[in-house]
Image (spheres, helix red, strand yellow):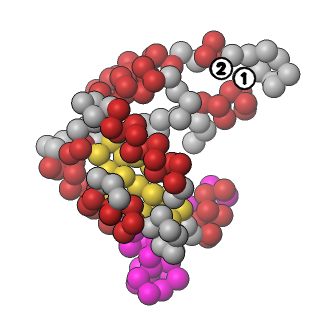
């Protein structure tokens, strides 16, 4: 999947041409596109770009049934997520939110236990450990065949891919539970 910037670099004008990305793509049309997609699909996943305009982000968040804050395990990122949530508290009811740390390293100072202790993320914080093989498969565009490999798919927690698969399963189960709790998914 290409982000908006990646799209313009690949299909838009070259870097040496003066181009404002906002001239090429109307970010304000996102909410309308989402409303149309909701008519045709049971679920619509939106990956918001950090650089999008605040007004657009707020409109999309208002339309959202479930919000997953996906961020890396860095103090600045954790702080940004917590500050954004505090600033937008009325827009972001806690029952609609899950937090996800990607590329997670449990030996970090900013591990799950310490983050929970020092924030209000509590039980809604999930992690996906960094996995080199998964990252390589993402780059190659072959994650589907990687996940179908029985060595990966059936890995027990103590095995090579076990923590990674266990974390993904926990996250997927919680997404389904949260959607059921919010009466969106049966």
- Residue labelled with disc 1: 12
Question: Residue 93 magenta-drawn?
Answer: no
Q: Quarter-wise, where is residue 35 in the image?
A: top left
Mark 2, Cα crowd under 10 Å, few <14 / some 14-19 / many 20+, is some
Q: Residue furthest right?
A: 16
- Give the number of marks: 2
Residue 155 in magenta stretch: yes
Please name the residue shown 51% across and 75% down the image: 107
**Viewer-proximal residue, 28 or 34?**
28
Residue 75: x percent and y percent? 51, 54
| SS class, disc 1 | loop
Badge 2 is on which residue?
A: 21
Question: Looking at the image, can residue 12 be seen?
Answer: yes
Residue 166: percent from left, percent from top = 38, 73
**Range of residues picked out in magenta:** 140-169
Residue 132: x and y, percent? 62, 69
The prevailing secondary structure element of the residues shown in magenta is: helix
Point out the residue furthest to the front here.
Answer: 118
């Amino acid at each position: 999947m290409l982000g908006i910037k990646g799209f313009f670099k690949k299909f838009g004008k070259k870097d040496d041409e003066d181009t404002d990305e906002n001239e090429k793509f109307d970010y304000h049309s996102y909410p309308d596109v989402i409303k149309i997609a909701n008519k045709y699909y049971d679920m619509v996943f939106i990956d918001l770009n950090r650089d999008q305009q605040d007004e657009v982000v707020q409109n999309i968040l208002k339309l959202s049934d479930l919000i997953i804050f996906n961020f890396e395990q860095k103090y600045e990122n954790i702080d940004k997520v917590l500050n954004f949530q505090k600033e937008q508290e009325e827009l972001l009811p806690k029952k609609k939110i899950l937090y996800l740390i990607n590329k997670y390293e449990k030996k970090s100072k900013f591990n799950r236990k310490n983050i929970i202790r020092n924030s209000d993320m509590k039980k809604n914080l999930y992690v996906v450990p960094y996995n080199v093989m998964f990252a390589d498969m993402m780059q190659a565009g072959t994650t589907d065949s990687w996940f179908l490999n029985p060595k990966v798919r059936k890995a027990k927690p103590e095995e090579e891919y076990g923590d990674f698969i266990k974390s993904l399963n926990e996250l997927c189960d919680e997404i389904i539970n949260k959607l059921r709790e919010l009466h969106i998914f049966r």
